[in-house]
Every structure is written in C-alpha cells, then in structure tokens.
Image (cartoon, grey):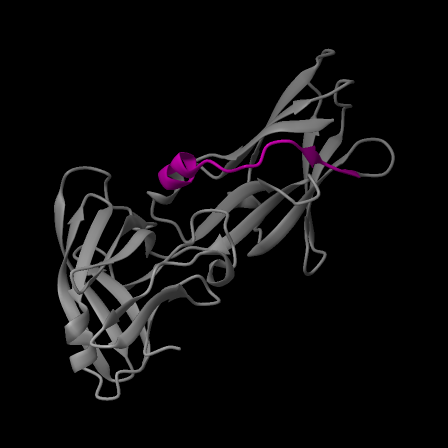
Amino acid sequence: MVVTDAEVTLADVLSLRMAIDHPLEAGTHLVLRHRGTGSERKVRLGTPGRPARDATVAVSLAGLKLTPGRWDAYLQQSGPRTRMQSVDPGFSLDRLDAYALGRRTMSYRAYRTRNGFLAIKIADAEPVADVRAVWFREGRFEVTGLLAYTGLGDDDQHHRARLSLKHSDATVTAIATVQGVRFHAALSLCDVLAATPDSEGVWEPSLEVDGVEGPMALGALLDDVEGKRRRVHYPATQIDGVPIKPSFSPADHLRLEVGAA
C-alpha cells in the first residue's frame, strides 16, 4: 500500500488516496502516533467492500484532540501495524494559501518524511503576516506577503494598516497597504538609523491591520521550508556605511540586523 495523494482539506479532514494490492480488511485502523510523546489515536476505516487497485479514505482530524507536533501514520489490519509509505510530497503553496485564509487556532498539514512515509504536522495557529518577498530600494526596506489565519476575505477590500519596526524601546512606523489578504509595506532605513544612536541591534517588524486583533509578527511559516535562518538569505545593504541585513529567527520570524558584521 502506497499513499499517492494526501491532503488536509479546509474542514480539517485528512483525505488520502492509496494504491493497494488487496482491498482493506474489515476492522482496518489508521493509527497516528505522536513522535515526541508516543501518544496514539486510532480511527477505524472499515473496508471498501470489493477488490480495487486504489482506495480513498477521509478522516476528520479536529475531533481526535491531536496536540501540536509531528504525528506518524500507520495502517493496522490483521497482524502488526505498518508505517504508511507515501509518494505525495504534500506541498502545494496555492493549497496552503487557501487553507490559511480561514480563522484558525490549530493548523494541520500532511507531508512526506525524508524517508518516504506519511506524517501530519500540527501547530498552534494565530494571525501572522506571511512574508513572500523582501528587498531594499532607494534607502527603504520593503516587504510583501499574505495575511494568514485572520479570517479576512481574499477580495479587493482595503484595510488600514501600519508596519512597525521595534528595537529595545525604540519604534519606527510607516503606513502599510493591505488589499484583501495581500500586504505591502515600505519603511525608511534612515529613520531606523536615526532612532538608534549606536546604529546596532536587531529590529523586529510587525503589522497592525484594522479588523485583526493585536499586531502580527512577520514570518515565513506556511511553506515546508524549515530552518530558514540557515536556508533563506536576502541581499544586504549599507546606509551611511552601516550594514543592514534581513534574516530569520530560529522561529522563522523576519528581522533586520543593523550593524551586524
């Protein structure tokens, strides 16, 4: 048995399509096992009812009380359970963007492990400004992206918004543009240097949008690239001889390193 397609739908239902040599037996269970704690959840799948070369399965994840972390998938029929092999990488940015448009407190994503097995990644979800592009132009820091887990509509409606850069007790702000769930913001780097006498330190950006409670961190959390501090690098710039470099924190949140070597 090999999983050929794995998706968590907008309703948090795990939808699987499997290529199988034999029909599933009555009493077959899908077993999800938490990689850290060993906690398990079992869901009875039943039988397709007749021999077939492939089968589809739909399992609601929301009712299983799954906790954040990685859950490995097993299939248990008669005899020992077997880990579910998968050929679906589980990655489609368009699909992940559509999933992130809803207001959620928990996110679920099916993916293929490095060794080729099916697993589910579960994380707490709160409104975030997901970064898609960062650049420096004419002395400005500019950023674009998508508002995730806010519940705002993906339409043409404009929302008042403000970008803030914070360092210790200093803050620099600028008006941002938000249309539907897409945002663009630009901020003068000269204002950043003027706000810090020593011109050094880490600045953390956030975005405030009307209709969304509290400021949203700028990060890159929706795709499947983890450890962005090591893997994603943006061009740096210099303002009045002071180097300024965008980077990511260990939690994949965007920040500006000012005066960094």
**Outermost residue toward the right?**
79
The reply to whether the magenta stretch includes residue 202 is: no
Quarter residue 6 falls in: top right
Kindly tell me whether residue 137 is visible in this rendering.
Answer: yes
What residue appears at the point 56 percent right and 40 percent down from the top-left corner? 110
**Residue 55: x %, y % from top left:** 65, 20
Q: What stretch is highlighted in magenta?
A: 82-98
Quarter residue 63 falls in: top right
What residue appears at the point 17 percent right and 65 percent down from the top-left corner? 139
Is residue 100 depicted above or below 29 in this figure?
below
As drawn, is 110 to the left or to the right of 170? right
Kindly tell me whether residue 215 is visible in this rendering.
Answer: no
**Outermost residue toward the front?**
241
Name the image quarter holding the N terminus: top right
As drawn, is 91 to the left or to the right of 69? left
What residue appears at the point 42 percent right and 49 percent down from the top-left corner? 222
**Residue 60: x %, y % from top left:** 54, 37
What residue appears at the point 48 percent right and 67 percent down from the top-left corner? 250
